[in-house]
């Protein structure tokens, strides 16, 4: 079982007291109400005594929202204050984590009215690593390499699918859209737990086109909720390695990446063939034409299913609104141009035509070590 051993990590070092102080000061600066000095004293004392400290519920809620606000790759930050924070720091054990991830999906999906939500599980403590979800997202599709080298399903998850099977997953039927099980590392050095997501916790949307009836025959679908589960929420020197969070989709993430990338579902040739485009020359712009119809289909399908989704034009202008608001509040809004600009029609969105400051701020979501 060598494949999952590498997910085990050394125990967390002590919390950096200066990081803790910076965060407590930020919290009090943005949430005036007094008590700064007493809180600073308590935090310093707790770190001296046990190597780390415990955030109050208010600090955790604020920290998680600011982590979103500081996410330089995210175009959708206008609503950062509305993030719902599920404080699940009392949950111990892999089973509890799996159960709460399922509850997260149900609450966040809201029958299609998607609610940006984060569930925060216990932090690693000195000498005591906490459980963590090994999936990149709570909902993703399996990928199976066929004997001829081609892949059924999502090629991005071939290795993860193999890991799940090695751990005993038998659910994978070899289909194109098999929802992967949760794989939860208990943090104790034991074997990861496999948990299938109940069907009613995973809302999916079949992809159809408003004009082309044949589109449904492509057999495409996508899940409603993008819930990233492999980043560590870092607040004031404390790392929460298990803190899955979701927003709602921007259509292009699915239509211009997941279903279109040559190393993902690679659907442009199939769409172009159905459209009867000339694929013998790049100059017919068959890829571009197919890409637009695929994106029209994704936006149409989510709307028809009553599932929250935004488009890249609306989201680009919202982002500039967010930027202006942040500046007005006296803050820099860090942004990575190469992630903010949409993967389709970049130059016809306003976010393309300027550059951004991009310092790394905390709280934030960082890769786990
Ligand atoms: N691009 C990723 C995906 O397709 C999701 C990233 C987060 N996206 C979001 N809208 N919150 O699944």
Image: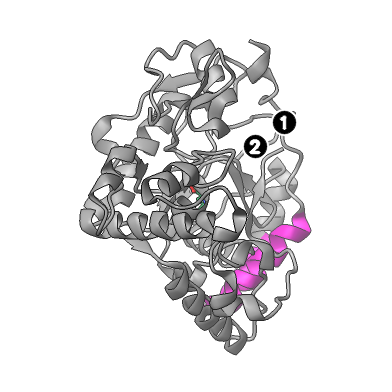
Q: Residue at x 52, y 59 (%)?
A: 288
Whether the residue carrying mark 1 lies under 8 Å from ligand 1 is answered with no
* 303 sits left or right of 46 in the view: left
What x and y, as percent, mark residue 151?
Answer: 52, 25
Q: How many marks?
A: 2
Binning the other alpha carbons within 10 Å of mark 2 as few (below 14), some (14 to 19) or many (20 upward) gives: many
* 149 sits left or right of 172 in the view: right
Q: Residue at x 49, y 52 (%)?
A: 278
Q: Disc 2 designates what residue?
A: 125
What x and y, as percent, mark residue 183?
Answer: 49, 25
Task: Give yes or no for contact between labels 1 and 2 (Cβ–Cβ under 8 Å).
Answer: no
User: Which is nearer the N-term, disc 1 or disc 2?
Assistant: 1
* 219 sits left or right of 87 in the view: left
What x and y, as percent, mark residue 342?
Answer: 56, 65
Which of the two discs, 1 and 2, sits closer to the camera? 1
Which portion, as a residue range, is magenta? 17-41
Q: Is residue 346 above or below residue 203?
A: below
User: Between 275 and 254, which is closer to the camera in this rendering?
Assistant: 275
Binning the other alpha carbons within 10 Å of mark 1 as few (below 14), some (14 to 19) or many (20 upward) gives: some
Secondary element type, mark 1 = loop
Secondary element type, mark 2 = loop
Check the picture and name the quadrant holding the N terminus: top right
Q: Residue at x 34, y 48 (%)?
A: 224
**Which of the 4 image quarters holds residue 202?**
top left
Does 26 appear in magenta? yes
Q: Which mark is residue 11?
A: 1
Q: How is the image coloured?
A: one colour
What x and y, as percent, mark residue 216?
Answer: 27, 43
User: Between 185 and 208, which is closer to the camera in this rendering?
Assistant: 208
Q: Residue at x 33, y 55 (%)?
A: 297
The dominant secondary structure in magenta is helix
């Amino acid at each position: 079982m060598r494949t999952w051993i590498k997910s085990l990590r050394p125990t967390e070092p002590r919390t950096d007291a200066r990081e803790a102080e910076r965060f407590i000061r930020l919290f009090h600066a943005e949430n005036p109400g007094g008590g700064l000095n007493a809180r600073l004293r308590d935090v310093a004392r707790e770190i001296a005594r046990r190597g780390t400290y415990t955030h109050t519920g208010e600090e955790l809620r604020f920290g998680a929202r600011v982590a979103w606000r500081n996410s330089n790759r995210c175009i959708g930050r206008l609503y950062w204050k509305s993030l719902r924070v599920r404080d699940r720091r009392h949950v111990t054990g892999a089973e509890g984590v799996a159960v709460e991830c399922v509850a997260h999906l149900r609450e966040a999906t809201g029958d299609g009215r998607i609610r940006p939500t984060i569930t925060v599980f216990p932090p690693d403590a000195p000498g005591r690593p906490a459980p963590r979800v090994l999936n990149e997202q709570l909902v993703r599709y399996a990928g199976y390499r066929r004997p001829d080298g081609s892949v059924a399903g999502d090629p991005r998850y071939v290795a993860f699918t193999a890991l799940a099977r090695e751990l005993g997953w038998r659910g994978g039927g070899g289909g194109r859209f098999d929802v992967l099980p949760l794989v939860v590392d208990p943090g104790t050095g034991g074997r990861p737990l496999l948990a299938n997501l109940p069907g009613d916790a995973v809302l999916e949307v079949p992809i159809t086109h408003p004009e082309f009836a044949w589109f449904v025959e492509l057999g495409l679908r996508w899940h409603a909720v993008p819930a990233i589960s492999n980043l560590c929420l870092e607040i004031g020197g404390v790392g929460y390695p298990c803190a899955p969070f979701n927003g709602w989709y921007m259509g292009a993430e699915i239509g211009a990446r997941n279903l279109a990338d040559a190393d993902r579902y690679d659907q442009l040739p199939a769409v172009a063939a159905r459209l009867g485009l000339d694929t013998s020359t790049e100059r017919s712009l068959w890829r571009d034409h197919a890409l637009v119809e695929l994106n029209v289909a994704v936006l149409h399908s989510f709307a028809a299913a009553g599932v929250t989704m935004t488009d890249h034009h609306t989201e680009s202008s919202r982002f500039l609104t967010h930027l202006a608001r942040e500046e007005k509040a006296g803050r820099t809004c860090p942004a990575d141009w190469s992630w903010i600009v949409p993967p389709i029609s970049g130059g016809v969105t306003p976010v393309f035509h300027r550059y951004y400051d991009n310092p790394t701020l905390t709280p934030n979501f960082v890769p786990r070590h």
